[in-house]
Image (cartoon, rainbow, N blue to C red):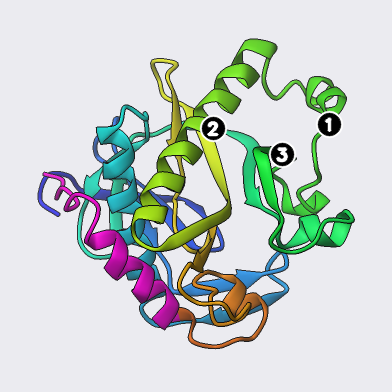
């Protein structure tokens, strides 16, 4: 890390720490080994998880950038550090579901594994204190989180990300069941994909495995006490490495 100097801690979340640097146009993100589920009611530390998520996210951001998807990503520092543009993150989690799983099957009479066409897009208010509630159109308007044009752009960008990732993961034998992303605005007002894209934020199933537990290569292995979490993330990383550009080293 020679092109910048690390500054103060700006924010610490469940999976990452975000630091200022001596440059106003640059923020450093450290990926932690912490694993959490159910709004951090379940916690553990999994050695190597942070490095894997950083490397997976970096390669996926490189892949998306090559296809015209704007992101906050600028490069990596070392194995668990990512350099990004500062953004004003919209406090809305965008979830796209290609296949029914997780909470959708608990909340609606839809069987696990049901294909959703078109993909279902849901918006959630990003606030652990309120349990990240689902946002209806009326609630979104009431909170004033985004205006009509920003919401349109947000949903278009999320669906573009979905198209690109579905194609990529399919090419490496993985099914993108669903995923969540965060979006934000840069200082110049551009809407970009922020945060991370990893097995922490995506449900990924191995297309070659029929067993409903063994096929899981994502955070559900931790949620469901299936074991082999880091090994599953490592398998995703290995496949992504073979299909995506080498992460650029910043500086």
Q: Earlier in the sequence, mark 3 or mark 2?
A: 3
Image position, residue 157 (x, y; %): 50, 27
Residue 84 seen from this side: no
Kindly identify which residue carries mark 1.
136
Q: In the figure, is residue 29 to the left or right of 155?
A: left
Question: Which element carries disc 2, helix, strand or loop?
Answer: helix
Q: Nearer the viewer, mark 1 or mark 2?
A: 2
Badge 1 density bin: few <14, some 14–19, many ≥20, Cα 10 Å: few
The residue under the point 62% across, 43% down is: 96
Q: In the figure, is residue 20 to the left or right of 150?
A: left
The residue under the point 28% across, 52% down is: 59
The image's mark for residue 168 is none
What range of the chain is rendered magenta? 230-251
Query: Is 104 in front, or is 133?
Result: 104
Image position, residue 56 (x, y; %): 34, 59
Image position, residue 9 (x, y; %): 42, 53
Q: Earlier in the sequence, mark 1 or mark 3?
A: 3
Q: In the figure, is residue 139 to the left or right of 192?
A: right
Kindly identify which residue carries mark 2.
159
In the depicted structure, whether residue 145 falls above or below residue 96:
above
In the depicted structure, whether residue 113 falls above or below residue 124:
below
Q: Earlier in the sequence, mark 1 or mark 2?
A: 1
Kindly identify which residue carries mark 3.
122
Query: Is 22 in front, or is 16?
Result: 16
Image position, residue 21 (x, y; %): 28, 43
Q: Quadrant of the C terminus?
A: top left
The residue under the point 33% across, 34% down is: 85
Q: Quadrant of the N terminus?
A: bottom left
- For the residues marked 1 and 2, what is the alpha-carbon distance in whole angstroms? 18 Å
């Amino acid at each position: 890390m020679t092109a910048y100097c690390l500054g103060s801690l700006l924010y610490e979340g469940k999976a990452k720490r975000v630091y200022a640097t001596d440059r106003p146009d640059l923020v450093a993100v450290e990926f932690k080994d912490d694993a959490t589920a159910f709004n951090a009611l379940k916690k553990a530390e999994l050695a190597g998880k942070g490095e894997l998520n950083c490397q997976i996210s970096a390669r996926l951001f490189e892949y998306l950038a090559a296809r015209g998807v704007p992101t906050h990503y600028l490069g990596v520092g070392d194995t668990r550090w990512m350099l990004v543009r500062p953004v004003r993150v919209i406090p809305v989690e965008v979830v796209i579901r290609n296949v029914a799983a997780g909470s959708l099957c608990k909340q609606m009479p839809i069987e696990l594994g049901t294909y959703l066409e078109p993909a279902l897009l849901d918006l959630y208010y990003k606030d652990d204190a309120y349990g990240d509630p689902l946002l209806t159109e009326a609630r979104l308007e009431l909170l004033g989180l985004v205006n009509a044009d920003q919401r349109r752009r947000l949903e278009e960008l999320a669906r573009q990300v979905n198209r690109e990732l579905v194609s990529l993961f399919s090419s490496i034998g993985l099914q993108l069941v669903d995923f969540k992303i965060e979006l934000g605005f840069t200082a110049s007002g551009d809407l970009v994909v922020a945060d991370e894209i990893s097995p922490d934020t995506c449900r990924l199933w191995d297309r070659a495995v029929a067993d409903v537990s063994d096929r899981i290569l994502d955070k559900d292995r931790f949620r469901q006490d299936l074991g082999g979490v880091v090994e599953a993330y490592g398998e995703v990383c290995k496949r992504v490495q073979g299909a995506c550009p080498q992460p650029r080293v910043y500086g």
